Amino acid sequence: MNKTWNESVRSSLKNANDCNEYFDNDRFQDGNFPIKIPLEFAKRIDKTNPLDPLLLQILPKERQSTKGFIDSPVYDEEFSPVKGLIHKYPSRVLLISSSVCAIHCQYCFRQNFDYDDNDVLKNWADIQSYLSKRIEVNEVVLSGGDPLTLSDKKINKILRKIESIQHIKTLRIHTRTAVVIPSRITEELIASLNQTKLKVVIVFHINHAQEISDEFVNNIKALRNHILLNQSVFLRDVNDDAKTLAELSYKLFEASILPYYIHLLDKVSGAESFFISDNQAHKIYKALQNMVPGYLLPKLVRDEGGESKRLVI
């Protein structure tokens, strides 16, 4: 691909008219959560299949008034002692490092999050003061949005600041951008991650094997000296069967990525159509256990908005 990753972001499909023209249908409508689809991701969608699992993830649906679905299902705001930082777990904190994602997945649990004033660099003095007093914190998670929507220069600047806190030993990066725009894995980014004194863990977000492109697999070869994991979300009509999940686990393993978590859907307003019941999830997961070895079995978890994730099985 000749485009830079920045050009890929700028050329994304961003409204219903563009999407309906590109996919040659009339199924897209502009709604509460704006459309955003990189062309690299769009090209992996089978236009002839109305139930394509990638298409369903980015196709806006009408909001339904459903009991239990709320704007902030994991209560991030209640665990934010300083702007830009979420502290739910004793040994680690999450930084809202970016307000931007390369793709807008319609099940996103932070689609209603108020990103105003949460810029990490602008709030770094408060964040550093908070962390310096909490020596029990040994890991920082960069999330967002998506940290890889930041420039390499800005990411490197954040890394240097985190490194300056002596008791922080591990950096974890949660990203979907690297999957949907593989060119985001630049030489500069690789160099920054390879040079940091921090232990680096990269958690990709991939829900279906069809999302994994040859370019992505090739580009992440340069990251194999780091811990590479994946987290998925159980999504109705996307990956709600054991065979699909097993195919994903094996394809991840071929790329040197280990399945980490599969989340039950966070009940965010706007994601009602993706919901599957606990009973159905249990049955699928039990079947998956019989199809993959233990090291390729992701943990089935639910984020209950409290201080820890709960293992469902």
Image: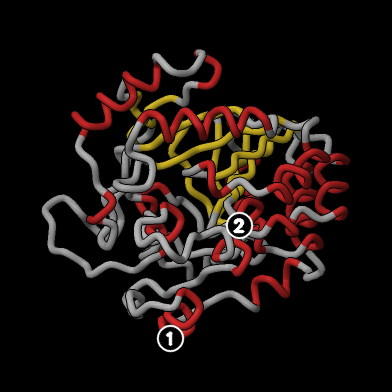
Disc assigned to residue 17? 1
Amino acid of disc 1: Asn
42 versus 199 height, above or below: below
Name the quadrant containing residue 84: bottom right
Coordinates of residue 119 in the picture (x, y in percent)? 59, 65
Name the quarter where the N terminus is drawn.
bottom right
Name the quarter where the C terminus is drawn.
top left
277 versus 36 height, above or below: above
Q: Is 202 in front, or is 37?
A: 37
Coordinates of residue 104 in the picture (x, y in percent)? 47, 64
> Alpha-carbon distance for marks 2 and 1?
21 Å
- Residue visible at 47% across and 42% down? 87
Q: Is 73 in front, or is 2?
A: 2
Q: Is residue 101 visible?
A: no
> Which residue, given by chain and number where applicable, does mark 2 sit on?
180
Crowdedness of circle 2 by 10 Å Cα count: few (<14), some, many (20+)? many
Coordinates of residue 196 in the picture (x, y in percent)? 83, 40
Marks 2/1 in contact by CB < 8 Å: the verdict is: no
Amino acid of disc 2: Val
